[in-house]
Amino acid sequence: MSDNISPLAPTQSIELPDIKGVTCRVARAQYKDWDRCDLTFVELIEGTTVAGVLTQSKCPSTEVEWCREALSDGKARGLVVNAGNANAFTGARGMEAVERILDLASQHLDCSKKEIFVSSTGVIGVPLPKDKSETGLKAAFNAEPCSWKEAAATIMTTDTFPKMATTSAIVGGKKVTLNAIVKGSGMIAPDMATMLGYIFTDAAVDAVFLQKMLIDATAKSFNCITVDSDTSTSDTVLVFATGQTEAPALTSYNDAGADAFAAALQDICMQLAHLVVRDGEGATKFIEIQVVGAESDDSAKRIGLSIANSPLVKTAIAGEDANWGRVVMAIGKAGEPADRDKLAISFGGVTVARDGLVVPDYDEKPVANHLQGAEIDISIDMGIGKGRATVWTCDLTHGYISINADYRS
Amino acid sequence: MSDNISPLAPTQSIELPDIKGVTCRVARAQYKDWDRCDLTFVELIEGTTVAGVLTQSKCPSTEVEWCREALSDGKARGLVVNAGNANAFTGARGMEAVERILDLASQHLDCSKKEIFVSSTGVIGVPLPKDKSETGLKAAFNAEPCSWKEAAATIMTTDTFPKMATTSAIVGGKKVTLNAIVKGSGMIAPDMATMLGYIFTDAAVDAVFLQKMLIDATAKSFNCITVDSDTSTSDTVLVFATGQTEAPALTSYNDAGADAFAAALQDICMQLAHLVVRDGEGATKFIEIQVVGAESDDSAKRIGLSIANSPLVKTAIAGEDANWGRVVMAIGKAGEPADRDKLAISFGGVTVARDGLVVPDYDEKPVANHLQGAEIDISIDMGIGKGRATVWTCDLTHGYISINADYRS
């Protein structure tokens, strides 16, 4: 948690409505020597369904392995999030700490251990201290319910602001609400379910269908962002549906309102994904990269991510330089079908390169003005097909180096 | 060219011997407004064979496309290198400039255009000015022969020191010599023939066999280094063999001395590759990453490069932090077969993590001392197979950001 809030943080704070069947509580486990809450306990009403996407890292944390196992039943009663210690690569001792949390929470809620989900975030390689977890969790059991904002703040690590989103959909004539909290600002990369994100809805959704919708929503949101190309060992996104409205239960895309709900889920995932980029370590610019005219959508996405992960493109944007040559370089290295002489590149809507060379008399002024802003648009037309994708990233600055070279494990 | 020489530059300067059949000359084309030579012209004796490896970028420069075409004949009489302008993504005008150089040089040497090789390095997207090339090239024709060091200095762009190497081999009882010059310090990434590198030998080598040996040597040298994961549009490594000794001609690995020559070629490629990393933009640490126990050699290389390209690993090393958790993360994201609980990680020969967790009482002092040095060794034992690879990179520092965010296209 930093004293300096990201310059890209939303300027308007939002209020999240209540979600019936969801109660958040926070407490101090003191995982680090800090003056803040760092353990979040969310109680979910009986009948809550759950879906999740988890890191594709080959070295995942114990918590990720547990969530993957627990998801197979599709039912949830509780969520525990520890901030300040990732408990990854901690072997049997790390597993013991998770087991203790599962025991305590399942006893408290009188449910199966497989209905308890656990995440931890922070330093890798230090076993989560069991005694601190136990003290913190018991304190949370007895704490007053807290606001969404307090829960969002309690799951933070290097984040500079609490990240929340809300949206709604009409299902069978009834309004359902989705709230979400998320943390993450470094070790953020694509091809995974990223960071820690939790979405809560009062809709009633079959767990298998919820999983399907979440995978679809993730593909175009979390998996289209990158801060630094590094994929965490602990990335987790879970969605919980309490079924506490009069809206009919959703079991497939054929149900009335399923499309509306899926769109709302996609929307809230996108909001979370953008919030993570806006809190990218050291970020000063929010960059949207649109690729059209590629051979396929997948190809467009890989080209977009090649640009979004290029240190030379990201430092150029930090320097407010419309260095389209580096964009050409990043397209060229993506390994995807490309025809240099059909390529067009725009910054802020102004085409600067086309047909294999610079546009001879393009107006540099609006481009320079655009680059000085905090919201940067880069558009690529590959000119060879109909594939399209949009990805998001931030610039690479001295701030990123300071945060990550000064950090001690 | 920077005023600040990389702290990783070799402290001892080397003298390169003459190579019979090779004459270097330099001149001022004034591609930029600078007080230095920026055009290199190398004359090669009739009968010289050539092999080359070129960028795998899908958006290569005109020069790269020309070299690829010219290599098909395997014969060389001249090499022209322009520094300060990459002439990439410059369409027909860029091609015209290359054509003019080919015309002038082939007339001067009374040879085929396909025996002239051209490279350009510098800013992308600005057509190489034909008039400057012509003036520079004609001046070079009339210049006195120069030293290897002057040639190495003339091909530099953001490099902080001229990079050269020499080695020799015994072929059929006769000594043959290999000299080489190279430039590059940013936009350096694997899976390609990297940067601009030129190797000259007085050995006699069949062009097809030379190509085969160069590809083998590149796989374990240039393709095992990375500075910033960004692949250039102009990467080129050429090797020229003048055949000006009494040593018998080499046509296959079955020839006496072929293994010795191949080893020397591998050695000189490795020297060049390491020099490039030692001049990595902003580098303060030279990092060797050894991976053993992987499923295959290819898998080991991909794991090594995933570590070498991780901004979080590179910033940790910059901060002199033995953050093996980030190494675990980078192994996990590589997508290669891995078993978290069989993994071992060492820094400077001290095993810090093993069997899925930290070594409980490892001695932190020698590790901390090692990290404070300029030469960092990281060893990974995947514990699942016999695959091995070694890759090299540098740390990621404020210097890299300063160089690349301040640079204007």
Image: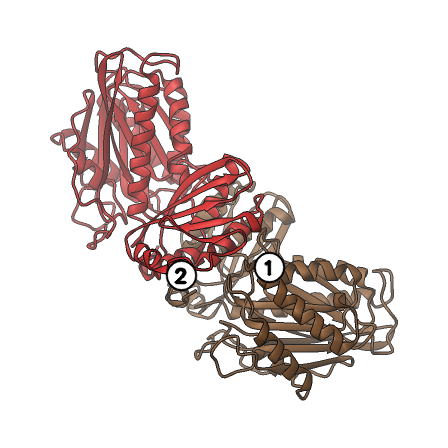
Chain colours: A red, B brown
Task: Give the camera-side residue of A346 and B371.
Answer: A346
Q: What quarter of the picture does the C terminus of chain B occupy?
A: bottom left
Residue A157, compared with residue A297, is above or below; it is: below
Residue A209, compared with residue A366, is above or below; it is: above
Q: Which residue is drawn at 44% across and 80% down?
A: B3
Q: In this view, does A259 lie to the left or right of B242?
A: left
* Numbered disc 2: secondary structure: helix
- Is residue A58 visible in the rendered structure shown here? no
Name the residue type under label 2: Glu
Q: How far apart are marks 2 and 1 (CA)?
A: 59 Å
- Residue furthest out toward the bottom: B144
Task: Tell me residue A258's x, y (percent).
Answer: 34, 17
Task: Give the camera-side residue of B276 and B196.
Answer: B196
Location of residue B167 (image quadrant): bottom right
The numbered disc on residue B92 is: 1
Mark 2 vs mark 1: give the one in front: 1
Same chain? Circles 2 and 1: yes
Location of residue B10 (image quadrant): bottom right
Estimate how packed mark 2 is, as few (under 14), some (14 to 19) or many (20 or more) residues with alpha carbons within 10 Å. Answer: few
- Is residue A68 visible in the rendered structure shown here? yes
Q: Is residue A19 left or right of residue B319?
A: left
- Residue furthest out toward the left: A144
Estimate how packed mark 1 is, as few (under 14), some (14 to 19) or many (20 or more) residues with alpha carbons within 10 Å. Answer: few
Residue identified by numbered label 2: B364
Labels 2 & 1 near each other (Cβ < 8 A): no
User: How many numbered badges does the structure rendering display?
Assistant: 2
Name the residue type under label 1: Ala
Disc 1: which chain?
A: B
Task: Give the camera-side residue of A207 and B3.
Answer: B3
